Image (cartoon, rainbow, N blue to C red):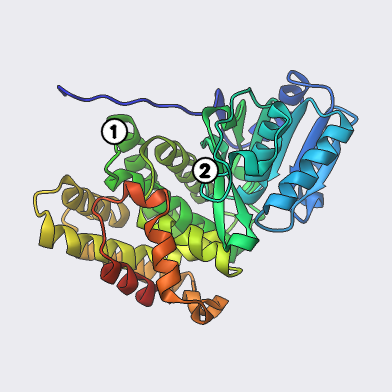
Amino acid sequence: MSGVSFGFATATSVLFGPGRAAELPDLVGGLGARPFVCTGARPDRHAELIDRLPSPYRIWQVAGEPAVDDARDAVAAARAHGADVVVAVGGGSVLDLGKAVAALLGNGTDPLDHLEIVGRGRPITRPSVPFVAVPTTSGTGAEVTANAVLTVPEAGLKASLRGPQLLPRVALVDPLLTLGCPPAVTASSGLDALTQCLEPFVSVYANPVSDGLAREGLRRAGRALRRACADGSDVEARTDMALCSLLGGMSLANAKLGAVHGFAGVVGGMVAVPHGVACAALLAPVVEANVRALRARDAAAPALERFAEAARLLTGRPEATVEDGLAWLRETVSLLGVRGLDAYGLAARSSDEIVAKAAGSSSMRGNPIALSPAELHAVLAAAR
């Protein structure tokens, strides 16, 4: 292992297991006395859990993927409440909002002070207010990542607040909280979780720790994703997918992503497509483009064997080839009813603009090979 050098960071504490959500009130009580609670559009889904938090608490709802103004409004409400701890109970969008609120409260700053690409990109220098992340979907792994994604409508893209201060104080992952997740959300978030294990696994920034996490996440996604979508009450499958999401979050936070997310962040800023759906539509086209480019220009690249290993992990077949893995991905996306991007209005947007923005995205830096504009156009065409 001569020459190996890497860093690894994750949430201060990760608590995982069915039923562990019951520990939330005591956890929060040990961090603060006035919780600010970010939830999705239906906080009643987890009312019994939230009602046990220390009082007084303030609930703040976010209906979809948060924009810059949503973060500003939430921070103002948290400050008015005198919040000394932030809790997020929901999907990846809710967790991202919670991370942003905790960081901006702790620093007394505005989102545009720190946002990459469209903001001033200033480092976040002061600690966040204590933040507890409680995911209710298995997808983004946001409970263990050091960034918070915000939509910037006027720029037509998504951008991140980023820094180690955004890592949650506690990530409390209870697979039972995902049992009520609808099939469509289970499918799109699960495909996002799978992608967030695959992209770090073939990333140019992969390291031995992220590799082990990504392998385990891919193995669990291969055996559980279709089952969780077919039967949402399957606790074993839900547990596997919650682990896949958690492991993917740890992997991407330390080994970065690739072209799927390079495109998805741009597309999601232009049209109202759920992030997981965008990733699902792009997944097979990006893998195919990467494999073709690697075979043509860098046939000795380790990423080619990584794609073959991923195929074996996903299919459960020791003889599986890269092509078998691609077939499994396409079949899974089809079985789960994921539509192409044009179904969400992307046809009206310029391919040149999308490709140019995607090529410059931070996620693209982890891709195992630099794709040409023509190759990126082909990916986009296949995902439409």
**Image point 25% across, 50% down: which residue?**
368
Q: Which secondary structure lies at badge 1? A: loop
* Picture quarter with the C terminus: bottom left
Mark toward the viewer: 2 or 1: 1
- Mark number for residue 146? none
Give the mark nearest the N terminus, 2 or 1.
2
Compared to residue 129, the image places residue 120 above or below, namely: below
**Image point 83% across, 42% down: which residue?**
59
Compared to residue 347, the image places residue 66 above or below, namely: above
Q: Which secondary structure lies at badge 2? A: loop
Residue 53 visible in the shown view: no
Q: Amino acid at mark 1?
A: Asn
Location of residue 81 (image quadrant): top right
Residue 67 visible in the shown view: yes
Q: Nearer the viewer, residue 110 or 28?
A: 110
**Image point 56% across, 78% down: which residue?**
345
Compared to residue 258, the image places residue 125 above or below, namely: above
Is residue 258 shown left or right of residue 347? left
Mark 2 — residue?
Answer: 141
Location of residue 131 (image quadrant): top right
How many numbered markers are drawn? 2
Is residue 206 shown left or right of residue 362? left
Q: Residues within 10 Å of mark 1 (few under 14, many from 20)?
A: some
Residue with the most extreme front position? 120
Mark 1 — residue?
Answer: 207
Q: Position of residue 83 (x, y in %)?
A: 82, 29
* Picture quarter with the N terminus: top left
Q: Amino acid at mark 2?
A: Gly
Report the Cα–Cα distance between label 2 and label 1.
18 Å
**Image point 45% across, 58% down: which residue?**
191
